[in-house]
């Protein structure tokens, strides 16, 4: 298999920058995700990189839950696994390497309680397929927090992605206020 033909993917080494502790002042995982993630949930962090959101999500879901971390770069996932092990979260964090098409993972079909798609959709070559994939993995009435960086993605492009999500079956709930991001909460609506 070959890796996905990305538009532009953040280089793996930039993942260390994304882990910068100062980032928590702008994008606190606990503040952003705390209202949505509960113990025992099965969640997705799509575009997890080295786990800036994944590890706090793992603490939120606890030992009865799972955090399924998807990324296209093996080096990102290797560092994520190492960080999860060091934090004692290796039994909660489940890495998934994504190849050409987002296929497979049938064991997750309709099993996900919450999904995070934070600052990554613009790197995915087929956003329509991405939203269809997430829709298929999620339980009915589960939530998707979708966010894109406003300094990198135009509002028009963000709205186009939201329309792809709606075409996949998601329903818009409400915009979210996250610094330097276009953000919205979506719900799987069967």
Image (cartoon, grey):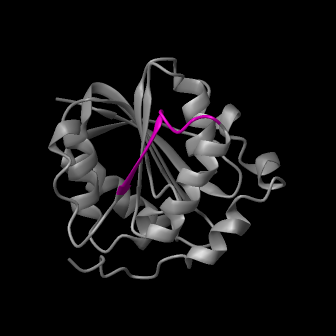
Q: Looking at the image, which residue is at 30% across and 77% down? A: 3
Q: Position of residue 69 (x, y in %)?
A: 43, 49
State how many labels appear. 0
Q: Quadrant of residue 121?
A: bottom left
* Viewer-closest of 139 and 141: 139
Q: Looking at the image, which residue is at 31% across and 75% down? A: 125
Q: Is residue 94 magenta?
A: yes
On the question of residue 151 being in view, the answer is no
Q: Position of residue 5 (x, y in %)?
A: 30, 82
Q: Is residue 171 above or below residue 127?
A: above
Q: Looking at the image, which residue is at 17% across and 58% down? A: 103
Q: Give the magenta-colored segment's residue range.
A: 88-96
Report the side of 155 relative to 141 (left or right).
right
* Viewer-closest of 72 and 172: 72
On the question of residue 169 being in view, the answer is yes
Q: Is residue 85 above or below residue 5?
A: above
């Amino acid at each position: 298999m070959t890796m996905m033909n990305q538009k532009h993917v953040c280089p793996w080494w930039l993942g260390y920058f994304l882990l910068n502790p100062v980032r928590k002042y702008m994008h606190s995982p606990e503040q952003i995700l705390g209202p949505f993630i509960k113990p025992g949930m099965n969640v997705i962090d799509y575009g997890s990189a080295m786990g800036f959101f994944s590890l706090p999500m793992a603490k939120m879901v606890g030992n009865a839950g799972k955090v399924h971390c998807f990324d296209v770069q093996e080096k990102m996932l290797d560092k994520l696994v190492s960080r999860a092990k060091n934090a004692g979260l290796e039994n909660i964090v489940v890495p998934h390497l994504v190849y050409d098409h987002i296929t497979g993972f049938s064991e997750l079909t309709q099993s996900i309680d919450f999904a995070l798609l934070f600052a990554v959709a613009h790197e995915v070559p087929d956003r329509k397929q991405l939203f269809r994939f997430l829709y298929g993995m999620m339980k009915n009435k589960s939530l998707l927090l979708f966010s894109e960086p406003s300094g990198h993605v135009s509002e028009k492009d963000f709205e186009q992605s939201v329309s792809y999500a709606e075409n996949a079956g998601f329903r818009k709930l409400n915009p979210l206020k996250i610094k330097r991001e276009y953000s919205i909460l979506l719900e799987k609506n069967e």
